[in-house]
Amino acid sequence: MEKLKICIMGLGNIGLSVAVYTRRYFPSTSGYDINEQAVAKALNNGIKASTFPERADVYVVCVNTYYRNGTPDMTAIDSCCRMISALNSEALVCFESTLAVGTARKMALKYGLRYVAVCPHRWWEEDQQNHGVRQLRVLGAFDEEGMQKAEKFYNKLKIPLHQVSSLEVAEATKIAENAHRYVEIAFVEELKLIAYKNGLDFDEWREAINTKWNVNLLEARDGIGKECLPKDTAFLASLSTEAELLRGAIKTNENYIQHFSKQSKPYYEQPSLLHLTKKHSPQR
Ligand SMILES: NC(=O)c1ccc[n+]([C@@H]2O[C@H](COP(=O)([O-])OP(=O)(O)OC[C@H]3O[C@@H](n4cnc5c(N)ncnc54)[C@H](O)[C@@H]3O)[C@@H](O)[C@H]2O)c1
């Protein structure tokens, strides 16, 4: 198995970490990225990398995914799958990017990819020792053979797995994890907005609430920015016209950012989010 050729597609934060980690177990690990700087950085880290993917036995897909104009954007995933299909449609394809639910199956069917698995990351830059590439990960596959191949691959990498029955459960787990965090933060943001409107000292109030044994309110900081939490929450909200809690949390975060941190902009531009709300809301 050590002789397998592995190609990591997308050499950014996740992909480069994956490539460096994977090369320890599979010496024939290469990398591919459309960005020449990312390729140069990978080369500096000892990874054989290029702006063209190699034929490989396993493709690990770590490219960007977005939420744009009120909908998930899987363009980079699609482009990688088209290339994999031309290079080796019998390869094992492991999606490690965060996917909109249904993407992996759609790609498998569209491009005739034989072995497809989803194994999303829980990667956290601040603590890569405990929350890097190697930590308990959820794994779903297209079928039993795909699961067996993927399990073998991740076992070789010594990555502990929680197996689920479908690609969709694995995709949905990733976005729900981050949406859960998003809602927790939005709740304290809501409290802080209420405190402000009602003349309460928020810090004192939060401290008092947290004295209850089953409550652990997070801090309300600068609003939920960066990429992952807003994107994943929007992916999840787009799955149902009735996801009012999620839409409410998104709105609260936007209000909070507008109110408390005028300098920073929310990850989403307001129009795209309103577009989502309007498009998916049931008529009243
Ligand atoms: N960064 C995190 O903490 C984190 C955690 C969990 C999951 N994720 C998910 O992992 C994925 C990658 O995240 P990241 O932080 O590494 O992003 P990143 O922007 O750091 O890296 C993505 C890389 O993919 C490359 N790329 C884009 N389109 C490509 C294409 N068509 N072909 C080849 N390469 C292409 C880009 O040039 C870039 O180098 C995303 O789906 C993200 O949501 C990220």
Image (cartoon, rainbow, N blue to C red):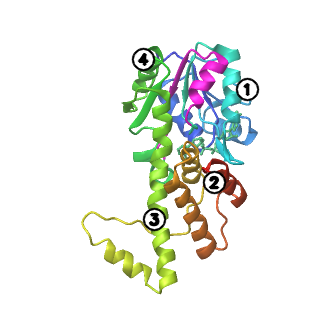
Taking the spot 44% from the left edge, 60% from the top edge, the residue there is: 184
User: If the image is split into quadrants, where does the C terminus sit?
Assistant: bottom right
Closest to the observer, 146 or 45:
146
Taking the spot 48% from the left edge, 49% from the top edge, the residue there is: 178
Contact between labelled residues 4 and 1, with CB atoms less than 8 Å apart: no
Asked if 147 appears above or below 175 in the picture, the reply is above
Mark found first going from the N terminus, 1 or 4 = 1
State the separation of the CA atoms marked 1 and 2.
39 Å
Q: Nearer the viewer, mark 4 or mark 3?
A: 3
Which labelled disc corresponds to residue 277? 2
Which labelled disc corresponds to residue 187? 3
Query: Residue 137, image x and y in percent?
Result: 42, 36
Closest to the observer, 129 or 27:
129
Mark found first going from the N terminus, 2 or 3 = 3
Task: From the image, tell me which residue sits under label 1.
Answer: 52
Contact between labelled residues 3 and 4, with CB atoms less than 8 Å apart: no
Task: From the image, tell me which residue sits under label 4.
Answer: 148
User: Tag 3: Cα neighbours inside 10 Å, few (<14), some, or many (≥20)?
Assistant: some
Query: Residue 177, image x and y in percent?
Result: 45, 47
